[in-house]
Image (tube, rainbow, N blue to C red):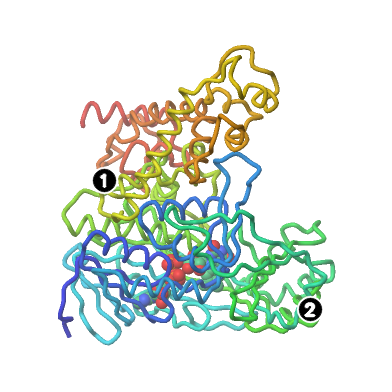
Amino acid sequence: MQYHEQFDVIVVGGGHAGTEAATAAARMGLNTLLLTHNIDTLGHMSCNPAIGGIGKGHLVKEVDALGGIMARAIDLGGIQFRTLNSSKGPAVRATRAQADRLLYKAVVRQTLENYPNLKIFQQACDDLIMDGDRVAGVVTQSGIRISGKTVVLTVGTFLNGLIHIGMENYKGGRAGDPPSIALAQRLRELPLRIDRLKTGTPPRIDARTVDFSVMQQQHGDDPRPVFSFIGDASQHPRQVPCYVTHTNEQTHEVIRNNLDRSPMYAGVIEGIGPRYCPSIEDKITRFADKTAHQIFVEPEGLTTHELYPNGISTSLPFDVQVQIVRSIRGFENAHITRPGYAIEYDFFDPRDLKANMESKCIANLFFAGQINGTTGYEEAAAQGLMAGLNAGLRAQGKEAWHPRRDQAYMGVMMDDLSTLGTREPYRMFTSRAEYRLLLREDNADLRLTAVGRELGLVDDERWSKFNAKMEQVELERQRMRSTWIHPQHPSLEAVNALVNTPLTREQSLEELLRRPEVTYDALMAIEGVGPALEDTAAADQVEIQIKYAGYIERQHDEVEKQLRNENTLLPLDMNYRDVNGLSNEVIAKLSDARPQTIGQASRISGITPAAISILLVHLKKHG
Ligand code: FAD
């Protein structure tokens, strides 16, 4: 049966990638369909109830700077907000918020249901409609054929999903949801490289059976950080504390004694798990000398007693899970509400994607989220937005756009995935970016909002708030540059009390702020120098831009040098055997990865600067 309407963009999957992909395309004015298993699970958090963290918070801010929905949803659904690394430099500071799982989901659903140009349809996608080597739509489980100019696949951990609890396993997309078997089979018939990964989640616990008095309490920050550039702390719901406890020798003993019942150690699970989010059995084995591991006891929401014990993800059998949990201080009488489990699923080698998330071998088909080998809501959201944007651009017949590595963590991730691929679930870290000082959370809007506006992703409200902020920053920077504290200045004494070495000549406020011991707030608190900008985000921007000007400029110079060759295009059908002087290893790697640009080629491990020079010479001769 043919569906009665045609779409510009069809997004399959209503998780974190799918919801950003669908809203991005819809924001661009395109007729968009979000096709998902179950409308009630739109925006569902499969694992930990939290958004952000180091590297991940950066992605959320970038998604927000481009008009995405994640930051706004967590501002309305967040029950504890913190800035991580707050004592370190601005490049690695990151926002993290604990979420009320239900509230977060409700905000996402409400947002989507009210989004112009977006229709939601509850059906499983079982097949793709192909027109030669391009996709032309999808077929649902009940045989409905829906035509679309472009299709974005964001089906998470659902493809051939296999859930493990001890030696028992069963098919599932995640606990409580069906797997995607028909679609997985169909995709295996297409010329795409597929492999298996695994991830896991801890058992959940009933707070009424926990003794919090023996745990350390952890509150959010005051003043409270805000995620969205257009949000404010008054939108946050009631805030609650988290708690910290630890595993101990007894816990480790229980795990060691039962490793033969772990599907991972018994060889039942083949997929590789996330290195930076290991299961508790992994931690005990890998760090055998450690006598305790930290557990963050996180509330799942304001209207539930369920707790998420962050740090004891496991696929051991349920009876062992009970012993593990009850060996932990404060959990002696704990009741488990949901067992922990591991899930194995299909993912697609992201080297088969162009840097705009489109398949290299099937035109108009885009991939985003966990199916590209990543892990995490934020990584999924960022890819989703990019895939939705590029599917939208394709539907409009426009050129693709994606940020470069020096413009956004999104650019770093898309480049890493499409050039290097991944053997284990990929998550974002600040260490993945070579231009960290340029890619800060605080300036994500400066980096992306203007280009987002041009692409049709940024609405009038965000655009006018952004411009107002930029104007404030610019005016304040001008004032700092042109206001001088001279030896007769009435505020001289107060200024000298603030600085390490007293002023011997007149200095501008900008020069004074560059001194390490001077902060913007302290300087502005001096009568006759202030007042400080009321908008703290604008004030932070002024301070960071002035204090780090030298370093920032140096990174810009490095970027410029790199850019000269970065964007030189490599033909996708290039035969590397025809290039004189390349080693067999380099030929194999380039033929396998099929980089689109010299920049991408240079980041493939084993591709030497010498090989890049040979390629450049070849292109000059034959290009
Ligand atoms: P998902 O959020 O999984 O969304 C997929 C969507 O696609 C769902 O709405 C689903 O219903 C829909 N769908 C699937 N198949 C079809 C179909 N055929 N037709 C229509 N709709 C379909 N991340 C971490 O960062 N750390 C962790 O420790 C961690 N642990 C995890 C543990 C478990 C058990 C699971 C399941 C996930 C875990 N994650 C973890 C990963 C995190 O949940 C994902 O990275 C994130 O949800 C990926 O977002 P996504 O949009 O790609 O996919």
Residue 432 image offset from top left, x and y in percent: 52, 44
Give the labeled residue for mark 1: 572
Quadrant position of residue 274: bottom right
In the figure, 44 relative to 571: above or below? below
Q: How many labels does the image show?
A: 2
Residue 174 image offset from top left, x and y in percent: 50, 77
In the figure, 557 relative to 379: above or below? above
Q: Is mark 1 within 8 Å of ligand 1?
A: no
Residue at image location 55% in from the left, 22% down from the top? 511
Give the labeled residue for mark 2: 326
- Tell which residue pokes out farthest to the right in this image: 249
* Three-letter code, disc 1: Leu
Marked residue nearer the N-terminal end (1 or 2):
2
Q: Quick one: 186 or 90, which is closer to the camera?
A: 90
Residue 493 image offset from top left, x and y in percent: 67, 22
Q: Quadrant of the C terminus?
A: top left
| Residue 346 visible, this orientation | no
Residue at image location 35% in from the left, 77% down from the top? 36
User: Gap between marks 1 and 2, in whole Å?
Assistant: 57 Å
Relative horizontal placement of residue 287, taking residue 579 as reference (left or right): right
Quadrant position of residue 50: bottom right
As helix, strand or loop, the secondary structure at mark 1 comes to loop
Residue 416 image offset from top left, x and y in percent: 44, 47
* Three-letter code, disc 2: Arg
Q: Quick one: 387 or 249, which is closer to the camera?
A: 387
In the figure, 280 relative to 225: above or below? below
